[in-house]
Each structure stands twice: as structure tokens, then as C-alpha cells.
Image (cartoon, grey):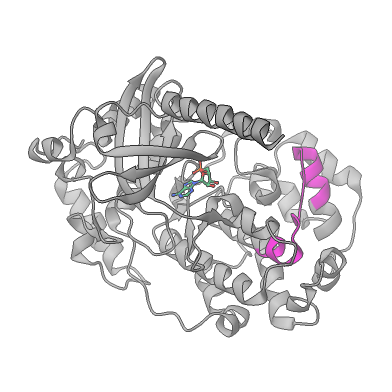
Amino acid sequence: MPAKKEGFNRVLDGLKKRQLQHDFKLERAAETYEPIQNIGSGAFGIVCEAVETSSNDKVAIKKVAHASATPTLARRTLREIRVLRYIDHPNIVTLRDIFRTQGPLGIDVFLVMDLMQNNLHHIIYGNEEPLDEYYINKFLGQLLRGLEYLHVASIAHRDLKPSNLLVNQDGTLRIADFGMAKFTDNSSRKHDDEEHCYYMTQHVATLPYRAPELLFVLPEHSTAVDMWAVGCIFGEMVIRNELLPGRSVPGQIKILLTVLGHPPQHVIDEIRCERTRKLIQDYGTKADGEWDDIMHCKARGADQIVRGNCDTIDFVKQLFQYDATKRINIQDALRHPYIQRVTPQMAAQKKCPFRVKRDMMHVEDLSHQDLIKLMTQDVRSAENTYNEMHSGGSFWSAGDFQSERSYEIQKAKYETSSHTNGLDGQHELGYVSGGHQWRIPSYCAA
Ligand code: AMP
């Protein structure tokens, strides 16, 4: 019997290896990276563990297959590249390299990142025991720090959930998967008439973490959507269950109404989709749930974090405001007595480089052709090594800003805006991150 099992396992291993070779055909980049095993998949990519042969470092390679084939895929890929390539933050995944190959259905893009050992979803559900309060607070603190860095640059992640929060054995948490990330400027908040019905927004943020403004398709989409998700993730760490576990848009709306009560009338008045408004109105009014009870009735042993704890309850309440303008923002969250109490004093952090914000500004308005053009410019071909590209000079499009002067003015404004902690010159020239020299050189510098 064991011999049979061994034989079966060998066949399985062989199949897995062939699948890996098929999925990760790296062309000339195979001189640099050796895929080891598949480790994950998301809605738009598959991820493998690999070794960088020159350094023997373990890395994760995410492949976005035929990234150029549709506007959605191209936009997702460009967003991820543009958020990550200049970012250097302990709580955001580190991008080391990007390259592309020509696949049968268009460009395949490969993002090489530092390898992380696990994700928060597995940590929450992988143990019999609830998460220790110490770790809940540690993860929450790191999530907020990573978000502060993004939100100060007006970048919203828009798909925060436990499986997008990568965690190492030492408890370091890093935010990953920026395919939905968006530059959210007040002036660009517009209501798209064609997007007024919720059935058209299925692709925006995973349902149990989806903020009401996305669910109800309200005009205001901002960094506040991430704060709602923070509440959902915090609740999930405490109760080891999704806090608002909807499986369809109407189902999710009903769960919100059941758990959180009725939205304020001014929020309902803003909903343009007749079906959504009717669904809410027909559901009847229900008093707000008490957070003490919501957490307690669902909790399995970890409810002491919330029960009777005024600071915690106030923090949760402020995260779950239907009205996005009333929801606590990242700076106030970091200053909240609960966070002050449970996370160690945090030093001021470096500001997200202005060029990240600049790069993200126009991604939402680009046509399919422009997306492909910029993606091709941003990403080196696997046939060109890092050194070849480096000597090739800059071919980064200057089109994002009308003039050099306009760029300088905007940058100066950003640097002197509130919450500035000063830009580190290293960020502007490429930098050393996690002990590795950044691999995207001057060809994508402005
Ligand atoms: P994504 O498409 O970015 O959501 O990634 C899908 C899954 O792959 C994640 O949920 C992780 O489990 C895994 N993954 C992504 N990036 C990494 C990484 N840098 N290190 C380890 N695992 C990763």
C-alpha cells in the first residue's frame, strides 16, 4: 500500500512539475529565475516560488497571462506595476523585477517579488485556536501603516482582504495585489451614469469586504473603501469568520442591513439604482446592531478583545460608517485610543514617492491601445537583461505630465503638503530594498 502511494505521489509530482514548466516559460529570464513550485493564484494571476540563481534568494513570481488581451487585464497589470515599482515600505510587498514574454494571446507579464511565507487568510483559518490578541493587534498596526503610506498619496487599494495580506514567520505583514488600486482624487470623483446599477460592479472588491459606496454604487469612491475593509479584516481576525459574509450583491446588502441596521436616509437618497433602493426600502428599518453583541455572538473565545471594551467598540463603529465621509480616515485611525493602546509607538514614516502618485493619475482614463503601449514601455522584454535595458537609456513616456515644469510644480506641492515627512532621495533614483538593488532602472524613470 505505501509503495503504491509513493508511486502515485511521484506521478503527481511529475504532473505538477510539467504544469509549472508550462505556466512559467520564462524564455531568457530562465537564466535568472528557476521556478520551484506553484504557491497561489488570484483572480488574474498565478504565483510560483522561484530561486534567483545569481543570489540564491527565494522569490515569488506572479504571472499575469495575456495581460494585453483585454482592457481590464491590461489596466489591472499597469496599476500593479505602477503602484509597486517605486514603493519601498516594510508593510507593502517588494517588487524586484518585471519582465514580459510574448504568449499566444498577447503579452504575458511576470512580476518578481520577495517571497513571503503565508497569507493572513491561512493564518486565521489554519489553526484550531483563535488568533492571539497580540498578533491581531500586530497585524492591524502593520496594515494601518501600509495604508497610511498609500492613502497619503491618495492611492486606494480597493481589494483588501486577508488573502491579499502576506505574512512572514516573524509576523511581518505586507499588503499585496494592487490590481484594483486607484488614484482617488477629490476632483476626479464623478458618477458614471453607465455604472449606476450594482449588477455592473461585480468586479469591484471582494463582496464580504466591499464598502457600501461600492455596493450601492454611490458617486464617492475614495480611500474610505479601504477603511471599511480594515473593519471587516479586524472583525474576521477576532471571530475567525467573515464578519459580513455575503455571496451575492443583494445578499451582501441584506447582511449589511441585518448586522448594521439601515443606512441613513441621505445615503439612500444618493443611490441611483432603483433596484438597490427598493431592496433597502423593502427590507424595513432595523436598529443598529450592538458591536458588543455582533462580535460576541459570533466569537469563539476571542470576544474579550471587543466585549465591554469601549475603545475597541468605538474604533469598529467608526470603521463601519455607511457614509464614507463620516468613516474614520487612516490618520485618525492611527491616532485612535484603541490603536494607540495596542500598537507600539510608531515613528513618522517616509512619504510615498510622488512619482507613484503621478504614475497612477491617468491609468483609469487610458484606452486599451494606450494601456498596451505603456505596459510594453514599463516592462522589459524577457529577452533583454537588466543590464542591456539599463544601458538603453530612457524611453519612459513623458505624456503623463504636459511639461517638466508641471511635474516639478505638482511634486513640490505634494512634498510640502501636510503629513510630509520628507522624501528620501534614494526613492527618486532607484533604491536598495530588502538588501537588493532595484531592478527597474532608468528606462522607466521620468
Ligand atoms: P495575488 O494574485 O497577488 O492575489 O496572489 C495570489 C496568491 O499568491 C496570494 O493570496 C498569496 O497566497 C500568493 N502570493 C502572492 N504574492 C506572493 C509573495 N510575494 N510571496 C508569497 N506568496 C505570494
Q: How many labels sit on residues? A: 0
Left or right, residue 261 beside residue 420: right
Q: Nearer the viewer, residue 272 or 49?
A: 49
Residue 116 is situated, as x and y percent measured from the top left of the image, at: 46, 54
Quadrant where the image shows the N terminus? top right
Q: Is residue 152 covered in magenta?
A: no
Left or right of 52: which side holds 297? Answer: right
| Relative depth, front residue between 370 and 131 | 131
Q: Is residue 203 above or below residue 302?
A: above
Q: Is residue 222 visible?
A: no
| Residue that appears at 77% across and 45% down | 246
Query: In the shown orientation, is residue 297 left or right of residue 201?
Result: right
Tell me the quarter of the picture where residue 77 sits: top left
Which residues are the magenta region? 234-255
Q: Furthest residue to the top?
A: 104
Q: Quadrant of the C terminus?
A: top left
Give the percent coordinates (x, y) of residue 101. Answer: 31, 25
Q: Nearer the viewer, residue 157 or 174?
A: 174
Left or right of 182? Residue 111 is left
Residue 249 among magenta residues? yes
The answer to whether 46 is drawn above or below residue 431 in the figure is above
**Percent from the top left, x then y, of residue 164?**
54, 50
Which quadrant would residue 227 be assigned to in this image?
bottom right
Q: Is residue 148 above or below residue 198?
A: below
Residue at image point 31% right, 39% down = 33
- Relative image position of residue 321 (x, y in whole percent): 69, 62
| Residue in view at x 18 percent, y 35 percent | 385
* Residue 281 at least partly seen: yes
Residue closer to the observer: 229 or 114: 114
Q: Residue at x 27, y 36 (%)?
A: 378
